[in-house]
Image: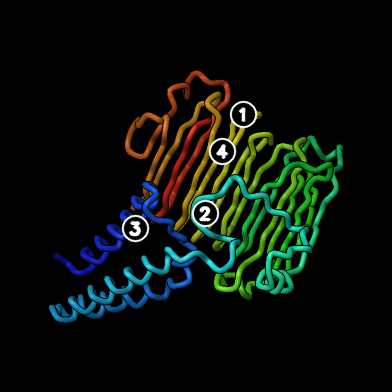
Amino acid sequence: MKLDRLIWGIILLFIGGVLLLENFGVIDFYWRNVWSFWPLLLIIFGLNMLFNRNNSQTGSMISIGVLVVGLAFLFYRGQQPPEHGWWGNNRFNKDIDINLGDEDNNDGDDNNDRDSTYSNLNLTQPFVSTENAKKTVLNISGGGISFNLDGETSELINADVHKKHGNFSLNKVVTDSATVLTFKMDNKKGRYNFGDGGNDVNFKLNKAPNWDVIMKLGAGEADFDFADYKVRTFRFDGGAAALDIKFGDLLPITDVVVKSGVADVKIQIPTTSGCRINTKTGLSAKDFEGFDKISDGVYETSNYKTSAKKIFINLDGGLSNFEVSRY
C-alpha cells in the first residue's frame, strides 16, 4: 500500500472516530483547540513526500509514527476546554445569551482581566423606506470572528462589536438596483490568532428588506436564525468554520451556497418548503434528514415538486460535516 493512502486512511479514521464518539456523547471535542496546530499537518505531509519518493521502509515507519503521535496529541488537546469561550465546541449552545454590553462582570479576576483587553463598538446604517423596493446586499468578511443574529432593529442594520484586535467598518452604497452594505475587518493582523480569544459581532437586521447575505470567513463561526427574515440568497465561502443557519419560508425561492474547507455546517429549513440539495463534498460527512437521494450528489424532499416555496442548497466542501434538517 502506498504511504500517502495509508496516511489519508489514518487521518480519516481519526476524524470519523472523533465525530462518532462526540455524536454518542462519549467525549466533548473542541475543534478550536485543533486548528491552532495546523502546521503539524505540513510536517506530516512533508515527511510523506520525502520518504514516499525514497521508497524507504524505515522512513515510512517514521512518517506513520509521527502521524500517530501527532493525532494522539490532537485527540488529547481537543478534549481540553478552551481558555476563552468565543469558539468552543463545534456544536452551538442555543441556551447561551451573549450580552456584549455587560461591563460589570464580577465572576472573578480572570474574567475582569480578560474584559479589560476588549473594547465595544456599535456600527449602524439607517433604514430609508424609499430604498426598500431594491434588494439589500450584506457583504461580511473577516476571520477569527464569532457572528450572531440578535433580533431585529428599526435601523437597516445594527452591529455590536466586542473586539480584542482589528478595526471594523460598516459602509453603505446605494445603486440603481440595490442597497449594498459592507461589514469587514479592515486589517489582517491577528486574523487567525486563536490562542488569545477573538472578536464577537452581534447583528440586528431590519425585517422589511429582501436580503442577500454574502460571507467570506477565513475562520470563525456564524449562528444566524433567518426564520423571520426574507433571505433571497445566502452565500458562504470560508475555511475552518462552524455554521448554524436557519431559514424561513417568507419568499418563493431561497438560494443557499456553501463552499468550505474544513467546516461544521448545520442548516435548518421549514417543512413547508420544498428543497433540493446538490453536493460536491469530497471526503465530507453528510446527514440530510428527511431527504430522498435522487442521484449521486442530488437530494430532494418529498414535497419538492409540489411546494410553492423552494429552497435550493449547493454544498461544496473538502473535509467538512454537512447537516440539513427540517423543522
Mark drawn on residue 15: 3
The 10 Å Cα crowd at callout 4, few under 14, some 14 to 19, many 20 or more, is: some
Q: Amino acid at mark 4?
A: Asp
Residue that appears at 80% across and 37% down:
132
Q: CA distance from mark 3 to mark 2?
A: 16 Å
* Residue tagged 4: 255
**Closer mark to the observer between disc 2 and disc 4:** 2
Assess disc 2: are there few (<14), some (14-19) or many (≥20) residues with their C-alpha within 10 Å of its C-alpha: many
When the figure is inspected, residue 227 is found, relative to residue 257, above or below; the finding is: above
Q: CA distance from mark 2 to mark 4?
A: 19 Å
Q: Which mark is residue 249?
A: 1
Judge from the rendering whether residue 227 lies leftward or rightward of residue 33; answer left or right: right
Q: Nearer the viewer, residue 104 or 55?
A: 104
- Circles 3 and 1: CB distance less than 8 Å? no
Position in image of residue 180 (x %, y %):
74, 50
Of badges 3 and 1, nearer the viewer stands 3
Q: Amino acid at mark 3?
A: Ile
Quadrant for the N terminus in the image: bottom left
Mark sitting earlier along the chain (3/4): 3
Q: Separation of disc 2 and disc 1 at Cα?
A: 24 Å
The colour scheme used here is: rainbow
- Residue 118 is situated, as x and y percent measured from the top left of the image, at 72, 70
The dot on residue 242 is 2
Residue located 18% across and 80% down the image: 59
Q: CA distance from mark 3 to mark 4?
A: 30 Å
36 to 99, vertically: above or below? below
Nearer to the camera, 79 or 36: 79
Q: Is residue 78 above or below residue 51?
A: above
Residue at figure coordinates x 50%, y 44% from the top left = 266
